Structures are given as C-alpha cells and as structure tokens.
Amino acid sequence: MKKHILFLLLVCLLLGNTAFSQVNELPRSTPEQEGVPSATVSALLDSLFSIPQTDIHSVMMLRHGKVIAEVYPEPFKAEYQHTLYSCSKTFVSTAVGLAIDANLLRVTDRVATFFPESLPAKVSPELASMTIHDLLIMASGIDPDGNLRADNTYWIKPLLAKTVKTPGKIFKYDSLCTYLLSAIVQRVTGKTVLAYLQEKIFSDLHINKVSWEESPEGVTTGGWGLYMQPESLAKMGQLLLQKGQWNGKQLISEGWVNQMMRTHIDTGDGRGYGYQMWEASKDGAYRADGRFGQYIVVMPKQDMVVVITQCSNSPNPWVVSRVLAPAVQSGSIDLGKDYASLQKKLQAYSYPSVSGKAKSNLANRLTGKTFKLEDNQFGWKDISFKQGDKQMTIVITDQQGKRAELSAGYKFWNTVWTESRPPYSMNAQQKFKGIEGDFAVAACYGWASNNTLHLNLQYVNWISALDLTITFKDNNIQVTVHKNYEPDVPQFSGTIQ
C-alpha cells in the first residue's frame, strides 16, 4: 500500500500541475481541416491584439467541436484560471434553465414569493409583479445601485426595498438581477448555483477546476465572480452550440438554449439581449460577455465557438464574427504557407519585458531595508528589495499581514505563487470569498536610471496587471502605479523603517 501511494506521489511530481490542469481535453485540428483559412485566423488575432488598451490573455477558436487555434501570450498559460466578471451571468441563466427543466421553476414565477422574509412592510404592485423572466432580460424595474454590494452585508433585502418601476419593459443592466436569480436557484434546489452546475453539467464536461465568489449571505454572486480556465469556457460554449447536448446526453433542454440565445429585449442601442446573453452578430451569434472583454462567442451558422480572456478598456466583440463569418467554408481546404506562418505567430505572442539595466549603483544598498508605505488602494503596508544578478526579489506585506515574496526577472518573466490577493476592481463586501488557492504573479524589472526602478507585475491567473515606477531618494521612495484595469494612476510614498 505504501509503495502504491509513493508511486502516485511520484507520478504527480513528474507530471506537475498538468495532471490536474484540465487542458488539452477538447480534440485539436488544423484550421484548414475544419474549413477555416489560417490567414483568417491570423487576421482575427491581428485585430484583437491591435485594439488599443488591450491585454489579451487567451484566445481559443473551435470549429466542428475541435480547437483549431489557441494562444496564451507569455507569461500566461492554458492552465491558469481567470476571473470572468459578467461572463458568469450566462452560467446562471443555464442554472435557471436546469431548474425549469426539473419543474422547480417557471419564468413566470414572481420574484417576491421566494423571499418573504426580505420583503418591505408594504409590497408595491410593481414588486409583486416582477418575474424571473424580468430578471433574465435585465428589466427588473429597479434602478441599478453600484454601491449596494459595498455598503451592505446582506444584499437581497435592501435590493427589494428599492422602488420598482414597470418591470419587464426597460433594459437596465444590473448584476444584482443575476444575483437574485442565483439566490432563487439556491432556494429551490438547496444548492448554490456552483454546486448545482457541478452536479448537472460540470461533471459531464469534466470541469473540476472552478470556483465562484460568494456573497456575505452565502449565495453564489451570480452576476460576477466565476473563476475558471479558458478551455472550460470553450466547453461551455460548445455545449450551447450543440443545443445542450454533450457526448449523446442532453444536459440542458434544447428549448432553453434557444431561449438563452434569442433576443427578448432591445438594449436601447440596437443590440439584442437574450437570457443573460448578448447578441454578437445579426446572423444568430450570441455571446457571454464580461467586463474588460471576457467572451464566449457562439456562432451557430458557422458551427464555431471563440473564447477570449483579456483586460481591455476598449473591447470590440463584434470583430470576431465580422472577421470569421465571411471566410469559413463548408469543407476542408488545402494546407498552405499561411498555416506555417500562423503557427509561428501563435508561438511568438509574448508581453515585452521591462526595458532598462539589470543593476544600478543603488541596488546593493537596498538589501535589508524595508520601506513603510503610505495608505494606498492596494492595501500594501511595506515593501523591500533584494537585488540579484539578473533577478530581483520584492517582498510586499499587506495590511492583513500577508507576505508576497515576488521574484522579477531581467529580460524575462518570472512567475511565483503567493497567498496574497491580486488587485481587483470589484466593489463588494467580502470579495474573493469562495475563491480557493494561491495566485500566480509574473514579474520583470529594469533600472530606468540609477535611482528609478521599473517593475511590471502580471497577475496571470486573475486579470490585473500593475506597472510600477519606483523612485528612490535618500531614505524615501515614491511609487507610481499604472493599472491595466482602471485609468487612475495612484501615487504614494514610503520611508525606511
């Protein structure tokens, strides 16, 4: 028995993370074999990577259920999970459909009936008439309140206490609509949305590497917070493309998938919105869509799925179908030089390392010195540096006492794992609750001058990146931070302790 256990441990050590990474499970093929010119794939990638203010983290393209191209720019990797923001909403809609298939819900059910303990003393006719359908199409009749999640420990009661106007009529995008759907599914199934999907869908799709944030009141956040790998997103997209069928088993009813991917309401700017999915083209494509450009684009007419994770402040999801749709062909086509060029391109994508010198005259004098930092939005309490040959160790301690020991490479990305939380734009109580495991930080550095250090931190299994300029003067430092997820540029100082 001991030998058997030791053998398993040895196998795990030899295989490393890949034994549990759940990547390379979908079949692979060439673009041409599936009727897509490599030149078109290359053109789409060129378009995506050229959009201003965009950090692409992964792109995966499928046709006929096979992966025909994928890219993870260095230092990103296929096995890294990614936070998905509102892309999560499509998964909640799926859970609602499963509950309806199980006769636990109907789209005409009144929302108020599920939360009798959270209703205001006087229930208005508008609140009483609000239905699950209204929540699914983002027409609750409640004006969105971006501060409610941050100001309250419990979210359902203050949400239902708000004024409700003509539910079902006017599209007003609100993640708390999806949160109510998540809470309703939990009420009728006795399981969180995550647990329910794990039981009903994820087990069949072999999606085990998944987490989802929870609210302070113990409900899957629903409208945001899902955390999974790009290939798992691709599996979900393929499931929707196949009308809910997977390996001959009907996991979701075809009727519900059709309801998800058809327009139920106009968003007010000419775009259609289904059941927690957006219209992606005028020829029947729909997409799951999250902040900063997290996409599952489902293209039924072309029998294609495209998955993108990124941090973009100017996302353009329409480019996917606009580039691909006109070029795909019904049968396979001959391989040509474009295929070889595409393969080189896929391998070449990489974020540039920081420019500058490997060392400065100041570097060695920093060792053993810790700088106490001013209050800052990252919650960093102090920072220290240790210069190596072509590597630098940066130790950051946060206000909770968690210590992140990062190792930045010179002219290369170096990745370490830490329990410290990455920067996160979400404004909500107890954010990260439900997210398991440590976080990976890829870092590189360069000395811009004798007293100015340039440091780049990519939180590669989250979404955020920080570009730091640290200026040293006497016993003080000045830190300037550019973020890839918000336009403000925080500055704060530090003093040697």
Image: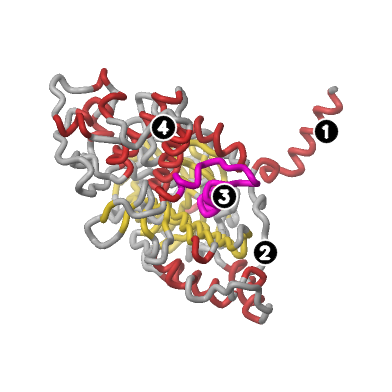
- In the image: residue 214, left or right of residue 441: left
- Residue corresponding to mark 4: 220
Q: Nearer the viewer, residue 487 or 196?
A: 196
What numbered label is drawn on residue 452?
none
> Which residue is found at the position 49% from the left and 40% from the top?
368
Magenta stretch in the rendered image:
234-257
Disc nearer the start of the sequence (3/2):
2
Q: Is residue 187 above or below residue 438?
A: above
Reading the image, the residue beneath label 2 is 29
**On-image quarter of the C terminus:** top left
> In this rendering, which labeled residue sits more in front, label 1 or label 4?
4
Of labels 1 and 3, earlier in sequence is 1
> What amino acid type should be assigned to the residue bearing mark 3?
Lys
- Quarter of the image for residue 74 reads bottom right
The residue sitting at 42% across, 71% down in the picture is 322
Mark 1: which amino acid? Phe
Report how far apart the C-alphas of labels 2 and 4 lie in the structure: 36 Å
Residue 237 in the image, given as x and y percentages of width and height: 51, 52
Q: Earlier in the sequence, mark 2 or mark 4?
A: 2
The three-letter code of the residue at mark 2 reads: Ser
In this orientation, does residue 497 appear?
A: no
Looking at the image, which residue is at 57% across and 45% down? Answer: 416
- Residue 235 got which mark? 3
Q: Is residue 254 highlighted in magenta?
A: yes
